[in-house]
């Protein structure tokens, strides 16, 4: 083995060692949470070891019973309903709006497109109070309506992502459809929308994850435990006036990661393709 081969092998070994070390540091909090869900409460904060003295799934049983007489099955059902409906609303509305901006020339298009981009820069804290007053007057507080209905009117980030994708679809397809007698909506429904699969899947993954993880929205608009999502239910476990069942919190926190993990594993190919084609990087 010559000097050049030895250097290449050493460089490869060092690169892999650094990557493994950084990966372990990044994933350590998740591993610690999973390990803590298998420990007794007295053992969790006693050491940083990932290996429990006596592994037990009892915390999962206690945690699944929930709090306030409501089991975690209800909380998971609420999170699935909220996340799924918000994702469907986002995909339908954002794709339609994106098609309009990308393909249809109308007066004031640049102005409205700029306005849409500006809404992306507004912190949620600025619109939180006006939105709450509006939804309160509509009688939507303590329902899922304030969390789901706005998603059916387009989400700026996903509109921008889909516009970038649609611009990569040949314009000749629209012209051919027009010659065949298709209307704008028919062209969008039967030609453009199916071709947007990578961008739609990418948007669905992001939106489902963000809504599944959403804490502030449900905290503002949901008051009854039977309506709580998983994020709110995990907060209910922590009670500063009594002893907190940390093992149960970590057990349910671990279960809450399962849907996101499965979705990412099944659709990561579309996620990478959608991000690459739409030019959304970094």
Image (cartoon, grey):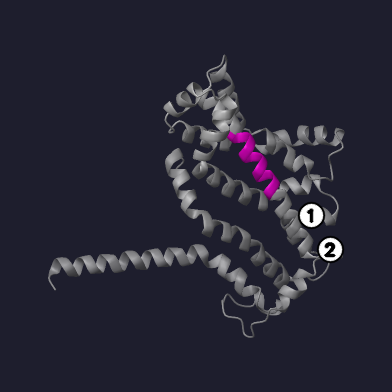
Image side of residue 36 versus residue 219, left or right:
left
Say if residue 238 shows up in the picture.
no
Place of residue 96 in the rendered image (x, y in percent of width and height, measured from the top left): 60, 31
Q: Are marks 2 and 1 in contact (CB under 8 Å)?
A: yes
**Figure quadrant of the N terminus:** bottom left
Mark toward the start of the polypeptide (2 vs 1): 2
x 77%, y 40%: residue:
146
- Callout 1: SS: loop
From what the image shows, is residue 228 above or below residue 185?
below
Place of residue 134 in the rendered image (x, y in percent of width and height, measured from the top left): 81, 32
**Figure quadrant of the C terminus:** top left
- Callout 2: SS: loop
In the picture of the structure, the residue carrying the numbered disc 2 is 70
Which sits in the foreground, 200 or 164? 200
Report the disc number at residue 228. Answer: 1
x 66%, y 62%: residue:
256
Question: Magenta segment range?
Answer: 84-95
- In the rendered structure, does residue 48 fall within the stretch colored magenta? no
């Amino acid at each position: 083995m010559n000097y050049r081969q030895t250097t290449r092998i050493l460089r490869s070994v060092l690169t892999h060692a650094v990557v493994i070390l950084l990966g372990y540091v990044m994933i350590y909090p998740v591993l610690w949470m999973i390990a803590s869900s298998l420990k007794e409460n007295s053992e969790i904060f006693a050491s940083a070891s990932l290996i429990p003295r006596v592994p037990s799934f009892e915390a999962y049983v206690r945690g699944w019973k929930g709090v306030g007489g409501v089991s975690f099955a209800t909380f998971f059902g609420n999170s699935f309903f909220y996340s799924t409906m918000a994702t469907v609303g986002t995909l339908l509305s954002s794709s339609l709006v994106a098609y309009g901006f990308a393909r249809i020339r109308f007066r004031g298009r640049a102005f409205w497109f700029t306005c849409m981009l500006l809404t992306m820069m507004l912190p949620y804290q600025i619109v939180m109070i006006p939105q709450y007053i509006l939804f309160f007057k509509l009688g939507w507080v303590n329902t899922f309506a304030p969390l789901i209905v706005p998603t059916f009117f387009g989400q700026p980030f996903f509109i921008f992502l889909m516009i970038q994708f649609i611009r990569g679809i040949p314009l000749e397809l629209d012209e051919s459809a027009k010659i065949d007698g298709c209307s704008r909506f028919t062209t969008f429904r039967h030609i453009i929308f199916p071709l947007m699969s990578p961008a739609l899947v990418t948007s669905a993954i992001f939106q489902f994850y963000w809504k599944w993880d959403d804490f502030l929205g449900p905290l503002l608009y949901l008051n009854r435990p039977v309506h709580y999502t998983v994020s709110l239910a995990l907060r209910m476990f922590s009670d500063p006036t009594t002893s907190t069942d940390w093992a149960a919190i970590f057990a349910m926190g671990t279960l809450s990661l399962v849907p996101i993990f499965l979705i990412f594993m099944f659709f990561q190919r579309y996620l990478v393709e959608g991000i690459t084609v739409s030019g959304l990087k970094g």
